[in-house]
Amino acid sequence: ATVLHVPVIIGALLLGPKKGAFLGGMFGLASLLKNTLVPNLSSFAFSPLIPVPGLDRGSPWALVVCFVPRILVGVTPWLVYTLLQALSRRGSVLQAGSMALSAVVGAFTNTALVMGLIALLFRDAYAAAQGIPAEAVLGFILGIVAANGVPEAIVAAILVPAVCIPMGKALKLNRAPLAAREPV
């Protein structure tokens, strides 16, 4: 479980999708460094320098798992928030609700894409690392999504509006949808 997606989502909503994607890239870089320097059971899925179980080398696909979902965490919440703001009148309750829903989308973007890519790209290796049959990987991963992804989404839904609304006001970003100034 992680909360590193929360600052990325906050950055995306306050600063726009380009800066959000950059922050997501930094989240991916932190994950790459952590999994390379302090490896654990599944680090092979996040670092090409960690050997994949059953092989004598790592996989470049680990960079996809490590970076693509995290970069998208800096884009998808902004897209959802911008769409919701365009569809509704702007008010603090609607703004907070739009931010909370955008945060949930961002959290699930991270969890679903990371775990989905692991299942797609590293199914057999992940099964070997976890000591489960390859056929059980999908169920195992869905359990992780439920156990980690749901609490991560709830935390994001609470923290993102609680930080973004006052920060947006302090930065005088409350005249338009927070990051609407920057196109994709």
Image (cartoon, rainbow, N blue to C red):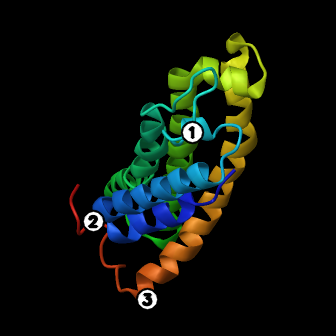
**Nearer the viewer's eye, disc 2 or disc 1?**
1
Residue situated furthest left in the rendering: 183
Q: Do callouts 2 and 1 mark residues in contact (Cβ within 8 Å)?
A: no
Mark 3 and mark 1 residues within 8 Å of each other at the beta carbon: no
Q: Nearer the viewer, residue 174 or 34?
A: 34
Mark 1 Cα within 10 Å, few/some/many (few <14, many 20+)?
A: many
Above or below 93: residue 127: above
Residue located 34% across and 79% down the image: 173
The numbered mark, 3 or 2, whose residue comes first in the sequence reads 3
Residue 118 sits in quarter: top right
From this view, report whether residue 133 is shown above or below residue 70: above
Task: Look at 58% across and 42% down and name the residue there.
Answer: 111
User: Which of the numbered marks, if any, corresponds to residue 117?
Assistant: none
Q: Secondary structure at mark 3?
A: helix
What residue did someone put label 1 on?
Answer: 50
Q: Earlier in the sequence, mark 3 or mark 1?
A: 1
Expressed as whole percent of the image width and height from the top left, the position of residue 3 reads 63, 59
Seen at 60% across and 54% down, the residue is 37
Q: Do callouts 3 and 2 mark residues in contact (Cβ within 8 Å)?
A: no
Q: CA distance from mark 2 to mark 1?
A: 40 Å
Q: Is residue 12 above or below residue 101?
A: below
Residue mark closest to the camera, 3 vs 1: 1
Judge by depth and name the residue closer to the eye, 32 or 103.
Answer: 32
For residue 170, which numbered disc appears in the image? 3
- Distance, label 3 to label 1, CA atoms, is 44 Å
Q: Given the image, on which type of amino acid does mark 3 rest?
A: Ala
Q: What label does residue 180 carry, if any? A: 2
- Going from N to C along the chain, the mark reached first, 2 or 1, is 1
The residue under label 1 is which amino acid type? Answer: Ile
Amino acid type, residue under disc 2 in the picture: Ala
Q: Secondary structure at mark 2?
A: loop
Residues at marks 3 and 2, CA–CA distance in whole angstroms: 17 Å
